[in-house]
Image (tube, grey):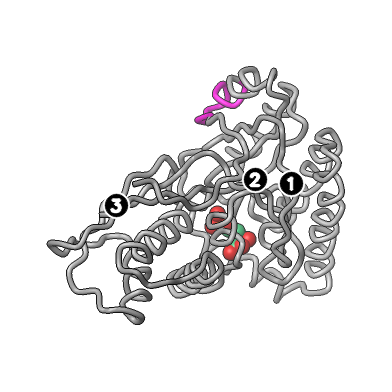
Amino acid sequence: MVICSAPGKIFLFGEHAVVYGEPAIACAIELRTSVRVREGKKSKIASPYVAGAVKKISELVELERVNIDIHSDIPTGSGLGSSAAVTIATLFALNIEFDVGLSKEEIAHLGHEVERDVQGAASLTDTFVSTMGGVIFLPSCKRLNSLNCGVVIGNTGLSSSTKEIVDQVAKLKDRHSDIIQPLFHIIGELAKKGEYLVEKGDYKNIGELMNVNQGLLESLGVGSSELAKQIYAARKAGAFGAKITGAGGGGCMVALVDVDDMEEVASAIESVGGRAIYTKVTETGVTHDG
Ligand code: PMV
């Protein structure tokens, strides 16, 4: 029997534009998904991501009777990378239990293939960050300094389909390519400037540029009134910056916060109907826990 866990993630900058090759910055967070794999009575697998992970490994080694249990702190369909975390933790656990011999890089790439098979378009962001942990600049996958501040997430409780929202943005880009392409480019420029600010630990300016990124995500049509309320409430309560994280539509917003202001920001988010989650950035990617 093997137990492995992998973290969820937030985007500081660059969701959506990253699908078109622009830079982005994403960070692993302390919320995790744990997967237990045993050789034994074959379990019924409900998650297409877990089924996809099992299929990938079964193409490499014989995998007849495998039993899988999942436990997750990460709300699903909410922009926090829950599907990548379950995919990566499953691949890692199968890799150990069945002596497959894959490296972490190979696990991240196989996980990306699983996400692409299930969702259509998907960037390497979620699976790479979940595998490696830390603050990652994409597409080069360069590791940046960690963030030594608080992260407060506001969950709308409304699940949204990443695939549908990515398709919606693709259609907007097809209709108005001359307008939308430059917006993607500016989002990429925000991520590049963000790289420098993260290395300096300049949370005030990171927050200010997260707010600019939010304006551009609104322009792409991925905002919602529930998300906007929580974003404004968090900023008013003293967050360095606040924006959508992930695909948008429903899902979550994220606020970067001084650790002393976390409670105030969380209660502001709750006062407008959000479910607040306190977390921090973690350097720990996928782990073998037992
Ligand atoms: O909602 P999430 O956590 O799956 O993030 C989606 C991020 C997008 O940039 C919209 C898509 C992607 O695959 O990068």
Q: Amino acid at mark 1?
A: Gln
Residue at mark 2 to residue at mark 3: CA–CA distance: 32 Å
Question: Which sits in the foreground, 269 or 81?
Answer: 81
Gap in angstroms between the C-alphas marked 2 and 1: 7 Å
Q: Position of residue 8 (x, y in %)?
A: 52, 48
| Image position, residue 32 (x, y; %) | 45, 44
How far across and down, in percent of the image, does residue 108 sit?
53, 66
N-term-proximal mark, 3 vs 1: 3
Q: Quadrant of ligand 1?
A: bottom right
User: Residue 21: image x %, image y %?
Assistant: 73, 71
Q: Which mark is residue 244?
A: 2
Contact flag, marks 2 and 1 (Cβ < 8 Å): yes
Look at the numbered disc 2 and say if its residue's Cβ is closer than 8 Å to ligand 1. no
Q: Secondary structure at mark 2?
A: strand
Residue position marked by numbered label 1 in the rendering = 214
Ranked by sequence position, the earlier of labels 2 and 1 is 1
SS at badge 3: strand
